[in-house]
Amino acid sequence: MTKASKKSAPDALKDDSQLRQKRMIAEHFSRLAAAPETGDKCVYTFVPGNLTELLRCFDLLPVLPEINALQSAMRGKSKAYIALAEKAGHSEDVCTYVKCDLGMMKSGNIGPTGDRLPNPDLLLLSYTGCFTFMKWFEILRQEYDAPIAMLHIPYQADGKITEAMRAYVVDQLRGKIIPALERLSGKSYDEDRLKEMLARSARAEDDLVWVLQSAKNRPSPIDAYFGGVYYIGPIFTAFRGTEEAVDYYTALRAEVEARIESRLGPITPEGEIDNERFRIVVEGPPNWTHFREFWKMFADEGAVVVASSYTKVGGVYDFGFRHDPSRPLETLAEYCMGCYTNLNLPSRVEMLTRYLLDYDADGLLINSIKSCNSFSAGQLMILREVENRTGRPGGFIESDLVDPRYFSSANIKTRLESYFQMIEQKRSEAVA
Ligand code: SF4
């Protein structure tokens, strides 16, 4: 049954791109740690709707609290951090990213590289569809006594971006956000510099999309969920618009091209998947506390995730959107409005249906996250609707982002095995 090849090793097997992005992120954290000495100013902001190019244009350094939370979970720290936040009165139902972040702060704000993260000089709230973002920064504002700048992003309730919505966001960028960044950095807005960054963003986005779409091959050379979270790392965090991001995605693409040529499956921490048995689309974020174990449950069955919604949480690029340097503020507005968390349920159904068909997947699996309403609301409806439209079976499992109390290994493994058996049974019925 085990499909990961014999090349597996006790230490997680990593490809070159993974090591490269790990280095990039570590360097960023080192720069953040040194900020009190270097005088670099730090802006806390969220992944969906992040304005990295604009911040970098003022030489400001982004800090992403969700990334800190997931990194804490992967290092086994989130349980204690969440307990601290709950002791301080935050309810069990609150998004665990928030509680993990607060617990980390109360424990000295030590980041993933072991260094202390700087306090925010500004909280930039780019509000893309999740109400928790607002409450999270309200708490951080009290804790840090930091100024806050809010960019309100209209929800795509009707599934489209209108001219009035675009103008509303651009006005805020021009009238509120840019002046706040000018005050903080002491620098004037340089639109030519922003355009150069946006041009680099588009180049990196082209390569990222190419890599994600490589999963249309059989066998897929990548896993677009577990592996995908590494691929989106640089572009969804601090690097969009930089030369480093362009270089990373060029190298990643070359690596994946070589895998296609050799007809290789994805690399997993346990080894290569050398016999792809199931092609799955996954909706919902991964669990981070048991990430490697969770991935292994798929790899052991020869199940490869060929597309996922989570890898679109910081930007949906695969249906054509690219940052457009010729319309710098408009393009930033469109980017923010197009993030997955800002899409209505019919748009999500449409997107997942397309993934199943375009990637010739066997079915849609939902990982429903206990503490993330932004993803979880409406997921059962999504599942039924996608099943109806494609005729391909859906599966449903439940876990959490960073709270280990909500990852039941035995339960998830059993459900996954039943789901894969169901797919096999449907296949044999179709042949009979
Ligand atoms: S509820 Fe979900 S989208 Fe909102 S902050 Fe938490 S993890 Fe992010």
Image: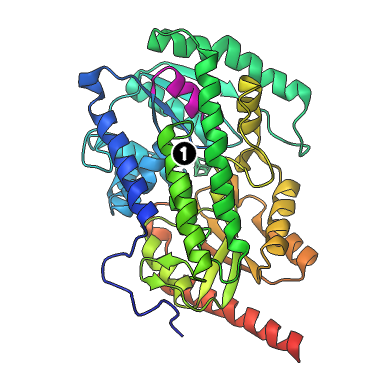
Q: Give residue 264's position: percent from left, percent from top.
A: 48, 70
Q: Nearer the viewer, residue 158 or 177?
A: 177
Pointer 1 residue Cβ closer than 8 Å to ligand 1: no
Q: Give residue 202's position: percent from left, percent from top.
A: 57, 35
The range drawn in magenta is: 49-60
Disc 1 packing (10 Å; few <14; some 14–19; many ≥20)? many
Instruction: State the image quarter where residue 323 is shown.
Output: top right
Task: Give me the residue at 23% from left, 19% from top.
Answer: 38
Q: Give residue 257's position: percent from left, percent from top.
A: 51, 59
Instruction: Work out whether 3 lies above or below 100.
Output: below
Q: Is residue 362 left or right of residue 190?
A: right
Task: Give me the residue at 39% from left, 60% from top.
Answer: 291
Q: Give residue 142's position: percent from left, percent from top.
A: 38, 22
**Mark 1 residue element:** helix
| Residue at the spot of label 1 | 246
Query: Could you tell me if residue 251 is visible in this image?
Result: yes
Query: Could you tell me if residue 408 is visible in this image?
Result: no
- Residue type at the position of mark 1: Val
Q: Is residue 55 magenta?
A: yes
Instruction: Work out whether 28 lies above or below 291.
Output: above
Q: Nearer the viewer, residue 308 or 294?
A: 308
Task: Give me the residue at 53% from left, 47% from top.
Answer: 372
Q: Is residue 163 magenta?
A: no
What's the coloring here?
rainbow
Task: Give me the residue at 64% from left, 38% from top.
Answer: 342
* Image quarter (top left, top right, bottom left or bottom right) of the C terminus: bottom right
